[in-house]
Amino acid sequence: MNARFEISSLFATETDVRSAYFGTDLWLKAPNGNPTNLTESQWLQVRTAAFKAWFGDWEFNPAQASKIVDENGEPQVVYHGTRHSFESFDHLCLSNNTGNDGHYGAGFYFSTEQMEAATYGDLLYPVFINLKKPVFDCPECLEPIAAQFGIYKEFLTVDKDWLADQIAAKDEHAGQLARLFAQGLSYENAWDEFIANGGNFHDNVLDLNCVGDLYENIDTAIGCYNMDFINEHFGEVPEHAKVYGFDEPVRIIYMTDMGNCGQSFTHISKGCGFDGVWANSEVVAFEANQIKSATGNNGQFSTDANIYH
């Protein structure tokens, strides 16, 4: 058994954590065995029961814990740069530094990079962030939010295997070529393989060049000309063979209009069940009590907004 699992996942105090780990091979190590990125004090604190009650049990139940963790799976320290000292983040102070709601929505902004955070002020706040369901800047994550902005997936292309089956049913030799394309071979390699296998160029029901054209851009869009060819030879495309996607790239900054619609994005994201954003090096917390100091917390990690409690 892994020695890590022989040690309790809950410790009342940092002293308890130290007593359990000090002198073992697990001391100042992340769960994956790598040296920790945390300071000794942070390493001890994130293993206490109070921290895990707030952040979630990132060691033994990461699916229900905050997703703001580093490459080792440990809670990640992120940074907020400002010109003023405070104990709680305040919604009334949003946008004071930048003049708009934020490219990734209205909220409290942090960076995984100290130098980036320092561009907003000389006073740096190292913190832990509790985001259990952040928005990631990818189409799969943004789909429910995009729908609220009137952006929907469209019928872009057809399933490659379905198309190969239809072609093979009409023309055995054309089907051989189509299956090579459907396997993911490049345009040139599919033709080379077809020729090497003794592919027949004569007496075909379907024009092989048209088959090649069908597959040349099938990963992005089928196109009107190719769609006409499919409808003419195989009839209407059934729903199960249609591939849907976004016609234009779906990015957070497009929906927020570079921050001008940040409040709307945050409101809609909350309605879709998200509690913040993690995009590239930037982390956005929607609520103040999702933020706790990584250097000055008293160990309570309470549900109030004070970063030191």
Image: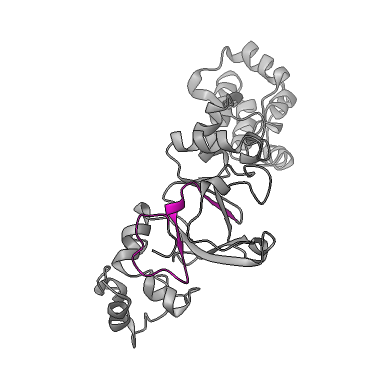
**Residue 287 vs residue 154, the one in the foreground:** 287
Q: Is residue 242 magenta?
A: no
Q: Does residue 18 lie above or below 203 as drawn? A: below
How is colour applied across the structure in the image?
A: one colour
Q: Is residue 293 magenta?
A: yes
Q: Does residue 167 lie above or below 25 as drawn? A: above
What's the residue at 46%, 75% (across, down)? 34
**Residue 209 vs residue 31, the one in the foreground:** 31
Q: Is residue 61 visible to us here?
A: no
Residue 112 lies in quadrant: bottom right
Q: Does residue 33 lie above or below 191 as drawn? A: below
Tell me residue 174's x, y (percent). 64, 26
Q: Is residue 298 visible to us here?
A: yes
Tell me residue 68's x, y (percent). 47, 57
**Residue 251 vs residue 308, the one in the foreground:** 308
Total count of labels = 0
Tell me residue 268's x, y (percent). 50, 33
The span picked out in magenta is 282-305
What's the residue at 41%, 50% (across, down)? 132
**Residue 271 vs residue 204, the one in the foreground:** 271
Image quarter in which the C terminus is found: bottom left
What's the residue at 58%, 12% (across, down)? 235
